[in-house]
Image (tube, rainbow, N blue to C red):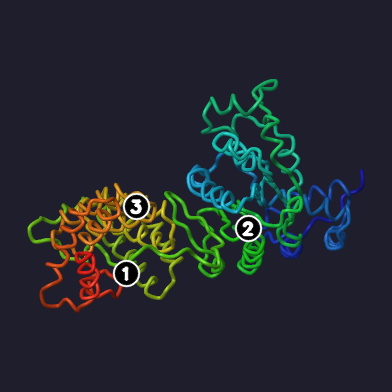
Amino acid sequence: MPKPSPAFDRADLPRLRDLLEVKTGLYISDEKLPRLKEPLEQLRAIDGAAPESIIAVIEGGGDDGERYLQRLVAAVATNETYFFRTTAHFTALKDYLLPELIERKKALGAQTLTIWSAGCSTGEEPYSIAILLLDHFPEILSWRINILATDVDLDALEVAREGIYRPWSFRGVAPELIRKYWRPLDGDSRRVDERVRGLITFREHNLNIDPYPSVDGVSGIDVIFCRNVTIYFRPPTIARLLARFHACLVEGGFLITGAAEYSREAYGEFEARVLPETVVYEKAPARRPAASPLPLPLILPQALPRPASRPAAPRIAKSRPDATRVEDDAVARAIDLIARDEIDAALVLLATAAEKSATDARIPFLLGRLAADRQHLPEAAYWLGRALALDPLNLWAHYFMALLWIEEGRLADALTALKKTTYIDPNFVLGHFYLGTIHKAEGRADQARKSFAVVKNLLAGPGASEDLSGADGISGRQLLVLVERELAS
């Protein structure tokens, strides 16, 4: 065995830390520098290499340089993971993102789906994605499905390729799912079923320097999972990484990150999507579909007067004495961001506020309103539904929900929601107008005329030329012309 060389001194560790960042993008702070000492002492003991020699070999690359570098990567990276970690991400993938992508691809006549697990560690994440596809989307299994799983840590990749896991990786996984997709081995280990393994390609990839992937000739990635990876990077590295992610995603593709990884500046090219319990980022299509008819401006529920004949909804007690102040601050800051057209920052702020308070109806109302503006209809329906659960007499939440149902062709549901608006406020002009529109569309001419007549009576008084509250610049006089035309036909 070679004679050990002199030990590393304190000046060597910052040099190695900087070299590690240049090679991989991984950065460790000063207080964590001692984590580099053990692998380097091991190299010194095994190879007898002097500190200067080890640094020079890593700088030069080659097989020995790669081997030394891998020791550092393994010491810095945390490969603690398990199957279906962060359930909210997989729920979002199953209930929102994949259905949206699949419908879009069917409309285009495409039958490919490409998902990249960037920083896949020991493989639990890409295997979880594959199992979700097998279990919930059997109709696309004939498609060309590519799940690319990459990592810079070769030891972790070897574990992933082997596909053998012990009980700690299965915490929280339903026993029936384990029996379905894993095969028991000796002891308490299990191997991933070949049906799952066959959907995945494992590959070494350095996010900092390697070209971003074209998967078997498919250049457009539909979904990227990159969770708790950028926590090891500094802001300039993160900005370069996200720009490259954006470039290799298809329009309408999604980036799923860890909960603590949002940066308003770094994610500027993406649109935030606030889904139940999580936020994801979309490479927004260059051209959005047209907005719903009569799009309405942002109006907070409490900013509108309640009908005098009905009592205000009772206030729900807050769970903490300071909850009201926290929520007021979040809502006020979100409205200020919206006024400055910083919608994504507002969405992320509101998503955080929604986690902290389950009692303030304004927060889900705002989230639903912003989602509707962007034509994210399932999310809008979810958030408006949450607002209504907290505040059943919220006229505007019922109204926006009605517009969503109209957009989706669910006229019976829209009719129910609009009837609630006119019950809450019998003088709500827009509610009566859309009731008439739906009655007419469904062949109920007499009921349509009655609704239009109510609109005419409400608009006949003074002030008809004023803008209708919440009608985005459409005046009462303009709406009166519409209903008079309907009544005359």
Residue depicted at 39% across the width and 52% down the height: 408
Up the image or down, 123 lies above or below 66; here it is: above
Q: Amino acid at mark 1?
A: Pro
Q: Position of residue 215 (x, y in %)?
A: 73, 51
For numbered disc 3, what is the local secondary structure? helix
Q: Is residue 316 left or right of residue 222?
A: left
The quadrant where residue 336 appears: bottom left
Residue under pointer 2: 232
The quadrant where residue 123 appears: top right
Front position among marks 3 and 1: 3
Residue under pointer 3: 405
For numbered disc 1, what is the local secondary structure? loop
Sequence-first disc among 2 and 1: 2
For numbered disc 2, what is the local secondary structure? helix
The C terminus - image quarter = bottom left
Observer-nearest of 121 and 94: 94
Residue most extreme to the left: 309
Q: CA distance from mark 2 to mark 1?
A: 41 Å
Front position among marks 3 and 2: 3
Q: Position of residue 426 (x, y in %)?
A: 13, 59
